[in-house]
Each structure stands twice: as structure tokens, then as C-alpha cells.
Amino acid sequence: MDLSKIKTLIDFVGRSNITELTVTEKDVTVRIFRTSPGQEAAAAIPQEAGPIDSLAPDAPSPVEKTAHAVKAPVFGVLHRAPAPGEPPFVAIGDEVEEGQTLFIIEAMKVFNKIAAPRAGRITRLIDIDGGEIETGELLAEIA
């Protein structure tokens, strides 16, 4: 992940009401947080990517061990298609490649592409389109 992306993420956290954001891209994980709502983003700590459970130790373990959860990294409006009237990026049963766009989350007039963290088959998919989703909400599972 390049420094301009990290700066954009820090600015996003500073302007929003979220207190923590974790983003993984390829083999790098960046965690940005602030200690109180009135402060700017406090830190960006690049980390080696590990299993999802090691990044969120207090998160419940997945029911199916072979499925990989795709969760919303930010609060915003979820778009399942690239534009209104177009087919969705993915459907249940579709095979996806690592890095393939699954969704777009619109947050503060910024359209964030949510990419598949690994290759596999979509086994579970959120049915919200054009509605608000919360940070950490389960969007899809890839087996």
C-alpha cells in the first residue's frame, strides 16, 4: 500500500465519526485509530497480514472454517452494481478472483471499491443494495 493511500485513509478517519479503521491490501494491513472523537487520526500502523481472527481477536469465529468473511471497512451506502440499472458485480455461486470488485461503498461522496481478499466461490451475499451498512457488517463469504 503506498503512502498516498494511507494518507487518504488517515484523512477519512479524521473527517468521519469512526474511531478505528483496518484495511488490508495484498500482504499489508494498516490500522488507523484515534483515542477520542474530537482528535485527528492518531496512527497508521502497517502490519503483516495474518488470519482475520488475529486482526480482530474479539470477533466471533466464522461458523464455516473454509469460508472467508468480507466485512464492510467503513460505514456508508452499499452499491452491489457499478451503476443503476446494471447487473450486480457478483451473485451467490459466482467464482471470483482475488482483487475482483465485489461492491462499492459510498462514504462522504467517495466511492470505495471493496475487492475480494481471495479467490473462491461466493457462498453468502448481503441483500442490501442502495442502503446503509455499518462498519464491520458481513457483506459476503467466499469459500
Image: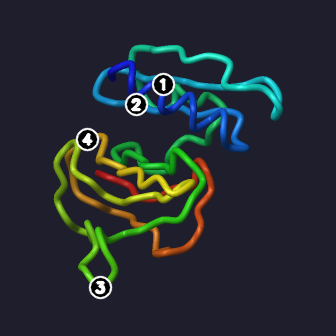
Q: Nearer the viewer, residue 29 or 76?
A: 76
The residue at 48%/23% (across/down) is 30
| Of callouts 3 and 2, the N-terminal one | 2
Mark 4 Cα shell of 10 Å, populated few (<14), some (14-19), many (≥20) = some
Amino acid under disc 4: Arg
Which tag is nearer the camera, tag 2 or tag 4?
Answer: 2
| Of callouts 3 and 1, the N-terminal one | 1
CA distance separating discs 2 and 1: 15 Å
Q: Do labels 3 and 2 touch, CB within 8 Å? A: no
Q: Is residue 115 left or right of residue 38?
A: left
Q: Secondary structure at mark 2?
A: strand
CA distance separating discs 4 and 1: 25 Å
> What residue sits right under mark 3 in the picture?
85
- Relative image position of residue 143 (x, y in whole percent): 29, 51
* Observer able to see residue 136: yes
Which tag is nearer the camera, tag 3 or tag 1?
Answer: 1
- Relative image position of residue 54 (x, y in whole percent): 52, 24
Residue occupying the far bottom of the picture: 85
Amino acid under disc 1: Lys
> What residue sits right under mark 4 in the picture?
118
Amino acid under disc 3: Gly
CA distance separating discs 2 and 4: 12 Å
The residue at 62%/38% (across/down) is 59
Q: Which mark is residue 24?
A: 2
Mark 1 Cα shell of 10 Å, populated few (<14), some (14-19), many (≥20) = few
| Of callouts 3 and 4, the N-terminal one | 3
Which tag is nearer the camera, tag 4 or tag 1?
Answer: 1
